[in-house]
Amino acid sequence: MSAVLQSRFEQFDVEDIMRGLYGDGIIGLKDAFDRHWVQRLREDIDILFAEAQQRPGGALARGPNRYYVEVHPERIRGFVDLVTHPWVAAVCESILGPDYKIVEVGFDVPGPGAANQPWHRDFPAPEETRIGRRLNSLAFNITTVDVTEDMGPFEVAPGTQWDDLSGCEGEMFPPKSLYHRYEARAQKKMPKMGDISARSALTIHRGTANLSAKPRPVFVLGVDAPDARNAEKHDLHMTKAFFETLPSLVKKHLPCRLVDQLESIAQAHTIEGLVMGTS
């Protein structure tokens, strides 16, 4: 880590980071980026979403009028700004250790008419978490709009990353008989442009119904500890030319495929239980 980044890294309290992610399972930082930076991110997402809709499997359904798209890092102009942000680096190192791996770059688009999702986590809890009580992956989210109540805010049930869903559908979807537990804890998140959050994707959550006339695109960065296996569900790759432009402190966290030309991404992180949405 460079001396400048180390100096800025130290402004964030490791104890606070760990308390938040091991407690509620989600933390955030207000005004991490300026609005112009976020506007450029939105421009990139709009272009990439339009392209994804034109190719088979380019945009995965996450419910009615709700989509997920995985993208190449070099198609995001602010990629380096994001992964070198001192708060992002501090959170990754505090929870995942110094050898964390960036394994996912993508975005979600809940469009107008998107329905409530069922309560869920994004993948089954690994043994390291279920038995070892250790988090070994994180998801960072950046909204590209000022979220309002009618736009279908992200809803999360704090502290539920430790729930044992063994025997439940896909080990990801709690039965409706337990919904009262999540509804009692539920918090709707309404971030503004420039804010960033980090969460355990095991914390039970859902997207809510978008009753507005506007989409709510949100950027996603997935990061693993060395022993996590989420990279198997993604196809992160970049050109050799782009990789060579990256700072060394970024390269060390990108154990991805290097290619001469970008290839279509084979998206494997399908979540069947989200396709239909819920009431």
Image (cartoon, rainbow, N blue to C red):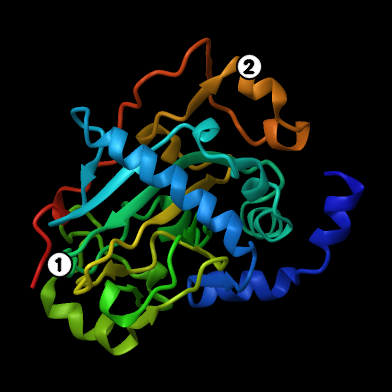
* Residue linked to disc 1: 115
Q: Position of residue 86 (x, y in %)?
A: 74, 57
* Residue linked to disc 2: 241
Closer to the chain start, of discs 1 and 2, is 1
Q: Residue at x 63, y 63 (%)?
A: 34
Q: Residue at x 76, y 33 (%)?
A: 247
Label 1 and label 2: CA atoms lie apart by 41 Å
| Rendered image quadrant of residue 233 | top left
Residue extending farthest to the bottom is: 184
Residue extending farthest to the right is: 3
Looking at the picture, which amino acid does disc 2 mark? Answer: Ala
Q: Which mark is residue 197?
A: none
* Quadrant (top left, top right, bottom left, bottom right) of the N terminus: top right
Q: Is residue 148 above or below residue 59?
A: below
Looking at the picture, which amino acid does disc 1 mark? Answer: Ala
Q: Residue at x 46, y 62 (%)?
A: 200
The answer to whether any part of residue 68 appears in the image is: yes
Q: Residues within 10 Å of mark 2 (few under 14, many from 20)?
A: few
Total labels: the figure holds 2
Q: Position of residue 97 (x, y in %)?
A: 68, 50
Q: Nearer the viewer, residue 202 or 102?
A: 102
Q: Position of residue 210 (x, y in %)?
A: 22, 70
Q: Nearer the viewer, residue 233 or 140?
A: 140
The answer to whether any part of residue 268 appears in the image is: no
